[in-house]
Structures are given as structure tokens and as C-alpha cells.
Amino acid sequence: MSKDDLDKGFVLEIRGLKKYYPLKKGIFIRSGTRWVKAVDKIDFSINNKGETFGLVGESGCGKTTTAKIILRLERPTEGSILFQSKNIAHLSGSELKRYRTSVQAVFQDPYSSLSPRMKVGSIIAEPLVVNNFLPTKTAIKSRVEELLKEVKLDPRSVHLYPHEFSGGQRQRIAIARALALNPCLIILDEPVSALDVSIRAQIMNLFKELQGKLGLAYVLIAHNLATVRYMSHRMGVMYLGKIVESGESEGIYSQPLHPYTKALLSAALPFRPNVKIDDIILTGEVPSALDPPPGCRFHPRCGYAMPLCCEVEPSLRLISNDHLVSCHLYQS
Amino acid sequence: MRRIPIIPLVIIIFFSFIAIFAPYISPYSPYEMALDDRLQPPFWQAGGSLAHPLGTDALGRDLLSRIIFGSRLSLLVAILALFLCGVIGAGIGIISGYLGGRVDIVLMRIADSTLSFPIILFALILMVAWGPMLSNVIIGISLVLWARFARVIRGEVLSLKEKDFIAQARIVGCSSVHIMAYHIFPNILNTLVVLLTLQLGWVIIVEATLSFLGAGIPPPEPAWGSMTADGRNYITTAWWLTIIPGMAIMLVVLAFNLIGDWLRDILDPKLRQV
Amino acid sequence: MTQLLLEVKNLKTYFFTRRGVVRAVDDVSFRLYRGETLGLVGESGCGKTATGLSLLRIVPQPAGRIVGGQIIFDGEDLLGKSEKEMRQLRGKRIFMILQDPMTSLNPVFTIGNQVFEAIKVHSNLPKTKVWSQAKEILRLVRIPSPEAIISYYPHQCSGGMKQRVVGAMGFSCKPDLLIADEPTTSLDVTIQAQYLRLLKEIQQWSQLAIIFITHDFGIVARMCDRVAVMYAGKIVEMANVGEVFDKPSHPYTVALMSSIPKVEIKEGKLPTLPGQPPGLHELPPGCSFFDRCAYTEKKCEAPPPLEEVGHEHWVRCWRHE
């Protein structure tokens, strides 16, 4: 372990995180209310600075909800979120504000993540102003220009409005804003999927460059497995509110263990024609998080389901160095 | 993009002009009585003269002057009432829409309860309760109309709230008040402007109706509504006393409605059904 | 020997806007045979969707107009047909699937109703026969319980389900040509896999020709026999799918393909394409890829023609003249 590791400990540690949404029929929660179990007890961690943790899964798996909870846009129903060894799950007031300066985000849609009636300069300066981060207006102005240069945009952009920029450029503006408060952790929620294909590599490389330069940790939420492989060091595969497999990215890509991970990888189309595709085509639809199947949540669609899978939920087991899997196939 | 509707714009500019410069362009004082010249017809009829181009009323007051000063009143009431409406309506709409939850439910119940009353009846009741006075008319009209603003603005805010830049503002550490003021408000301005313009016609009609019914601006103020009312008794003998103020009301309301439609089309086509 | 189904010659579709003329489809030519899938690949604004709309002659008017070329479908030029004749063709012989199934389905009618209508419009079968055909079609697109889904409304169905229903409505008349415009972009990747497999199966037994419009090279590799890469309204490269992946020749194709991360390998740093796709109303004279190309020469100031550089391999670039 390096000195840095000993100093910081875990940057982010999620333990037993749950988020249940009530399906309310009025304004009160009565007994017998049903719950949408969007996130149902997950654990993962980012151990070092400069590390990217990829969270992969399809719609309804809970990855976006997890992001919202880490960003404290929502409160968890249960569980803890340890940031630099402090539980931020129920912080409020000035402590929450302080946490916010360390954790920022870049969202998917470059067209709705920038305030349409504010100039770019004000958008990037806002975090600095709202947190009294810098003493003078001149200091703020030069910091904004510095940030624009960091994301490879012309500093004169401060006078322009977001609609005068393309999607890729707007995403750079969003990144500049995210960097303003010198955060340790940035949540990236599908940061390139709304961009043109030829622009994606530019933005992904920018993220990597900034990570190396500033020691940023990222939680990368994406459904595109190629993107996740390119950018993440470690990852977790989510299905219906649970993490079914996690560990080092390369380990998972070269040797996927969970049947769902295998299906996901099989569905991620390779870049070569006429490949004999190891077709693991899943049947059926993703069930709703309102009434997850009993036992292992994946068993109705799993090609390897055994009778045990319908009754008992498997737990995450360590298979090899940092590679965890939640599946009865690997339980003994 | 539709071209600017020239005629309504000219009408509005014209009436605004005469309202602002009333004391300089009006030939007489609107209160000045000349009992020798009672009930003179407009200049194009037999018996009329250019001394009183639009004729005189039962007390010999010059109709043109009263129309000119009346425009002052109508526009003043309209602007102040709308301003108040806008402030209350937008304020409550934003707070209700953004904060949601119990605050939203309570505020919207209050808004709904005022919406269920017919506008004129509601205004009438308030005036009868408070007494006819200029300030009461302005406050009364705002109380009647704010809920319409609040409802529409709240709708805008609900959809705006879901946008990523609002989440970003929270992530960056902005307080709810800051977000409502600097992120929500500037983005509902378009809608607000359109609403104000569209409601202006209503406000003028409400004021005119109140004055017509004697519950609005009291005499001897030359409110177009009361002028129309006063002329009722003379409709067969001195048609100009009712028709001319009536036409003034109609022209101004129509002009504002047309401009409002045009503004809405260019700023906020979503409001087409309001 | 496969039959030639569609031949597009020098198709030009322009949009006349206040900001200028947008040459969305600028001299596009290609051929499509029965049972074959042609991939139309490119980024937003390259003209691939406009091409698809032009084939069906449903380009948004009045701004958009097909200003030149020929669309020879099964021997007849579609541009010479009347609107009435086109209406009989649409949905029956040529069908289009769009990206968002929600807008292709009417939210106030049940699934059953809509499939029923789709079948009835193009056939003269009595009601009972239409219902049984509807259920047959839904079974064909692998919808688990057709009897149940018939009474569902679109909002009660998932994205994948809706896309299949739209497909069912299309296949009901056994069309010759399917134009699929990014049909799986909004679907989850495992659902996409199911859907693509379904399309391949249907194609195998029905000799359906498909024009697959996409920006995803993975889909191209999986589904297409031939590929046309579009940039700024023109086809810049066209070849068999193997050729395009083995020997991409146009600088855009090369740069684009190398800048895309591949799921099967751990990449080092991805090379990037500088700049961004051009706005179609302000194209440079000469080669439209000029601003972003790594290999420009003086010649590139004149627009290059599409030349054959290999067996059925066409490239629009002066380097390969």
C-alpha cells in the first residue's frame, strides 16, 4: 500500500445501502403500502484517488438512484455512505454544504444541465460564489478562466450563453463547473452517451487526463460496456437493485462469472463482423422493482437456474482477488 | 415567425401615449362642467362642433377629455393590478411548485378556492364589502386573478424542477431560495410576460364592469366603465355617451389580446390553450 | 441470384430554411438486394435519417424537398408516383421503424386495436380473420402472451415490447423493404440483443431487405451485409461489411472507427477526431471533411467524387483516386 492509501483510507465506501420508494395512494404512508426497492442493500468502495468505479446495468437496476444518493439529492432509506471515513448519509446544514464541495457531478444531457439564461462565466462561477470559495471577484474571474483552459475551451466563452455551444462543448462547460470547487470525487452519469460518436473519445480522454492530473476519483455510471471498460479500473454490475458482481474491471471482462454479466457482455456487440456470437439471449423483460422475484432476483431469466435459486437469495462471495459474485453457482 | 401585428401595436401605443400626456393634450379638464353645452353630439353630426369633437355629456363635460383621462385610469389600474397579480401569483407559483409537499397542497387549495368563483362576481363582492376606491379596485382585482397566474407558473416550475441544471445547482451548494430566485424565476419569465399580456384585457374589463355597476372607481373620475353606465339612460338620444367609451374599452382589450397572442406564439407556444 | 430491389440514384433532398439551404441528402446513390441489409452509418446531421424519410417520401414539408435523383423500387421510380400510390406502398411494401416506439403508437388505443387497424388497412380479410392474424403476428415477434397484450395500452408496455408491436404492425403485410431508423437506441442492451436476433430471423425466412440506420458500429457488424458511411449529406465510403472493418479507407471512417472504444479489448489511449460534425448549412467548399482530416492536400479544395477502389468498395477521397 502506498503512503497515499494509508493517509486517505477509503475515499468512498457504500455499506448496506437501501432506497425504497413508497407507492403512495394519498399524502400519507399507510400500512400495506407497497415499496419500489430501487436499491436493495449494496456495498462497494473506491479505495484510492485517481480511481474510476464503473456502475453498470440496464434500466431499473438502481445505478442512477445510487448516484443521486451519493450526491445527496435523495436520502437513503438505510445504510451508510462513508466519505473519507465520515458517514454523510444524514448530514444537513453546513456539514452537508461542506460535503458538497468535495463531491460533484456531470450528467448525461448537455442540453438541460446548464442554466439556459445564465452566461457561461456565471455558470462556472456559481459554485465559487455560493460557497464563498474565493475572496474577490477578480480571483473568481481568473479561476473561471483557468477552468475553461483546463477543459480546452476558449476563456472568452465566459460571455456567451450555453445555446451558442455544441453538445460536446457544453459537456466541457459542465466539467469545468464540476471542477470549480476542487472536488475529490465526481459522479459521471452517462457522461458521453448523448454526444456524437466522434466527440465521445475527446471527452473520455479529457476525463482521464483530468483524473491523472488532479487525482480525481470517479463513479462512472454507464450502460455502454465498451465505455466502462475504457474508463474504469473497478466496477460493479447491478441488477434490480443489487450488485451481482464486482471487482477489477479487467478481471470481470476477461472472466465474467455471474450469468447476468455474461449475458450483458454477450449483448455488447463486438467490433468485428461475422463473429460467432456466443448468444446468451435472455428471455423475458426486466421485472419491476416493486415485486422482485423471490430468492435470486435473476432466476426467472437465468439459463443456469437451480431449485435453490428460487428460494434463497445468494450473497456476495469473494472468489479471487477483489472479484466478488452473488450467485449460487459459486457458493460452495 | 408571425410578423408583429401592427394595428394592435399602434392602438396600444396610441392609448399609452394619450394616457401619459393626458394633461397636455386634453382640450379641457375632465371635470369641467359647462351646463350650456350639455349633450352636444360629436362634430360630424348636426349640432356638433369642433369645440367638443366627441360631444359632451349630461353635465356638459367634454367627452374627448374624459376619454383621454379615462385611458389613464384604465391603464393605471391595469398595470398596478397586474403587477400585484404577477408578484403574488408568480411568487406563490414558484414556492408551491418548487417546495412541493404540504406547502404545495395548502397553497393550491387556497388558489383553487378563489378559482371557483366567477371573476366579476368575486370582484363585486369585495368592492361592496370594502367600498369603491381606486386602491381597493386594484387590490380586489389582484385577489381575484392571482390564482390563475399561480397555477400556470406552478406547472412551469414542476417541469423545470426536473431539469438537470436544477439538480446541479443543489449539488453545487445553492440554497432553495437561491435556486428559486436565480434559476427558476428567470426561466419562467417568458411565461409570466405572456400571461400578463393576456390577462390585461381581463383586468380592464373587470375594472370597467365594476365601474359600470357602480362598485368600481367612484365619480367624478372619468372611468370608461362608469361613463358607459352613465350613458345608458341616453342611449336613444345621445348614443355617443355609451358607444364611444364602450368602443375605447373594446379597442384596448382587443389590441392587448392580439399582442398577447403574438407574444405567446413567439415566446411560449405551449400556452396555446390558456 | 438475389434480385435487385432498390436502386437509389443521385438522390438529393434539401431543406430550405431561413439560414440557408441545408443539403441533407446530397447526391446519394446505392443499391439494395432482396434479403440484404444495408447499414447507413454516421453521426447526427449526416443525412442518414433524411435519406430514410426520402425513400418513403415523408420528408417534412414545406421546408424539405426532394430536388433530384431517382428512387427505383422494384423497377419503378417512386419519385414519379402520385401521393395516392405512395400511400398504398407505405406500410404494405415499404415499412419504417423509428427510434421512439412511443410516438409510433397511439396512446389512446389498445395494442390489439392498433395491430388490427394495421392489418385491416392493407387487406380485405373479414374481422375474425384479422384478429387471428393479429395474434399470429404478435406471436411471430415473440411477444409472450398475445391474448393478454391485445388489451394493453402502450404505456403499460416496456420499450422492447412496444418496439416489437411496431414491428408486428409492419411485418403483418409482409413488406419487401424495412427502413429501421435507430430502432434499438432507446432499448436496454439485452433487449436490443433479443430484438436484433428477431430481425435476423424474420429476414431469413422472408427475404426482407433492410436499411439499418445507426451510429453504432457494433450493430453494423452484427446486422449488415453492406455498409454506407455518411458524412455531411454524402456517402463517403461504401463496401461489404468485412471490407469496411478490415480496410476502412476514407479518413473519416478510419478516424471514427479508431476513436470508438471496443468492448472486447482493453484500449490504450483512444485517438480522437478533432473538431465536430459540421452544420449542414455552412459546409466548406470542396471536401466536407477538410477541417478535421489529417491528410489534406491542395486537391481537397475541390469536392472529390465517389470512386471504386476495390471489389464493391467505393470511397470519396482524393487520396484513393
Image (tube, coloured by chain):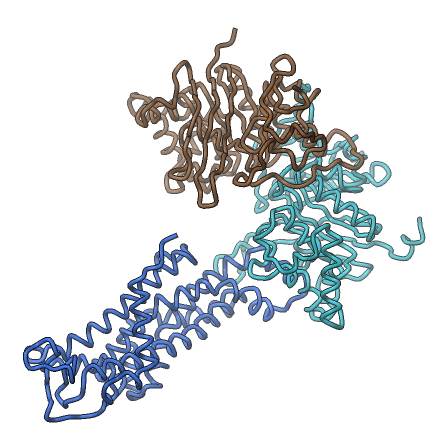
Chain colours: A cyan, B blue, C brown
Image quadrant assignment for residue A226: top right
Q: Is residue A306 visible?
A: no
Relative to C232, C112 lies left or right = left
> Eyeballing the image, is A118 above or below C101?
below
> Eyeballing the image, is B199 above or below B130?
above
Task: Name the one closer to the observer, C142 or A328.
Answer: C142
Quadrant, the C terminus of chain C: top right
Image quadrant assignment for residue C120: top left
Q: For the point 57% across and 44% down, which residue is it?
A: A291
Relative to B214, C278 lies left or right = right
Residue A225 placed where, x, y %?
70, 36
Relative to B73, C70 lies left or right = right
Task: Name the one closer to the observer, C271 or B218.
Answer: C271
Q: For the point 73% across and 69% down, which residue is it?
A: A138
Q: Can residue B224 be seen in this view?
A: yes
Residue B23 placed where, x, y %?
30, 86
- Residue closest to the far front: C298
Relative to C97, A326 lies left or right = right
Residue A283 placed where, x, y %?
59, 29
Looking at the rendered structure, the number of numbered marks drawn on it comes to 0
> Eyeballing the image, is A132 above or below A113?
below
Q: For the point 48% across and 72% down, which residue is it?
A: B91
Residue B224 placed where, x, y %?
23, 79
